[in-house]
Amino acid sequence: MRVLSGIQPTGRPHWGNFFGAIRQYIDLQEENDGFYFIADLHALTTVRDPARLRGYVIDAALDLLALGLDPAKATMFVQSHVPEVSELNWILLSGAPMGLLERCHAYKEKKAKGLVADAGLFTYPVLMSADILAYDSQIVPVGEDQVQHIEVCRDLAGRFNHSFGETFVLPKAKTLENGAKVPGTDGQKMSKSYDNTLPLFCDDKLDTVKKISKQIMRITTDSRAMEDAKDPEGDHLYDLYRLFASDAEVEAMAAMYRRGGFGYGEVKKAIAEASEAYFGPAREKRADLEKNLDYVHEALRAGAERARTVAAEVLSRAQTACGLR
Ligand code: TYM
């Protein structure tokens, strides 16, 4: 199966990115033909500083490699290194209904906040569709917030196929039951734009463990008394713990909630310990990779070369279908 997904280089990745999406990339690279890219064209809608953008792209590659993406098993590349995608973007834009894009939540939310949205943000789901269709992708592993965009992609691909004959493969989104919508420190969806994220890596490696435990301790909780029992369902601390723990540990935590007689501090401590055990090895691996940037650049170069071969073939098929050749 051709599996494809992308992540924006807009800052440090957080637990939501990992448990919703990156974890799936790593699992799926074993048995599938995985294409994973760093969406720098999409990031241009928010990052307007060239040095920062360049830095974020390399950071994202380091993050993915440290977390277990293997360039020998999957194709890892930078979105803009495959210019065929931008050409396909125009083909898809011509024919994308305004109403369809107006309903997309990234644009709607920004407008609702009274912020000025640019055309890049408005047409963001079309570029995403080009990303997906350019590689004949069948499965797109993502968090819940991207599912709507994959529906847009299916819609646009279906319209094109209807007008010009079978050209594009219709993809399917793949989300995980435990991880599709990871809560942030305030209980809302974890998101860089809500300033409620728990990062996987920090800039200062020595401080990472301390910094992250501090952030964990700041997770909001209700004013339940220590002795009171509590239903674990819908509690965001419990949901965060579930991401790391084994079935038996989750069951034990749920029983503790139902029994009562515990403090939220205990749960936070358990989360801090579990997250450290879980991400500690990736942090060490990242520090090693940072000393070997040539390897990272070479992986991105080889990935782009492979990705371009596939995208050129699909672009040519689309151009022929609609009369551009
Ligand atoms: P981005 O960079 O915002 O997020 C990367 C991935 O992380 C997932 N995610 C979450 N999952 C669970 N809980 C959360 N709180 C959470 N926050 C983020 C996202 O769903 C995503 O899978 N538009 C995309 C990048 C992109 C793309 C594509 C993805 C560009 N082209 C083509 C798939 C296919 C984005 O902004 O992801």
Image: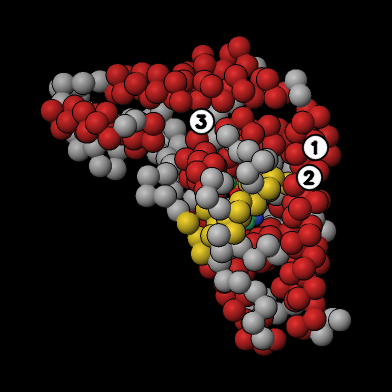
Relative horizontal placement of residue 322, taking residue 214 as reference (left or right)? right
Q: Any mark on residue 298, and which?
A: 1
Amino acid type of the residue that numbered disc 1 sits on in the rendered structure: Glu
Look at mark 3 in the image and give the residue it sits on: 198
Residue in front for this viewpoint, 249 or 12: 249
In the displayed structure, would residue 32 be above or below residue 228? below
Q: CA distance from mark 2 to mark 3?
A: 32 Å
Amino acid type of the residue that numbered disc 3 sits on in the rendered structure: Leu
Relative horizontal placement of residue 149, taking residue 118 as reference (left or right)? left
Residue in front for this viewpoint, 220 or 57: 57
> Residue 55 lies in what quarter of the image?
top right
> Residue 246 lies in what quarter of the image?
top left
> Residue 122 lies in what quarter of the image?
bottom right
Query: Judging from the image, what secondary structure is the residue with disc 2 in?
Result: helix
Residue at coordinates 61% horizontally, 62% vertically from top-left? 137
Mark 2 Cα-neighbour bin, 10 Å: few <14, some 14–19, many ≥20: some
Q: CA distance from mark 1 to mark 3?
A: 30 Å
Mark 3 Cα-neighbour bin, 10 Å: few <14, some 14–19, many ≥20: many
Q: Position of residue 81 (x, y in %)?
A: 81, 51
Q: Any mark on residue 111, and which?
A: none
Amino acid type of the residue that numbered disc 2 sits on in the rendered structure: Ala
The answer to whether residue 5 is seen in the rendering is no
Residue reaching furthest left?
259
Earlier along the polypeptide chain: callout 2 or callout 3? Answer: 3
Look at mark 2 in the image and give the residue it sits on: 302
Q: Position of residue 90 (x, y in %)?
A: 78, 70
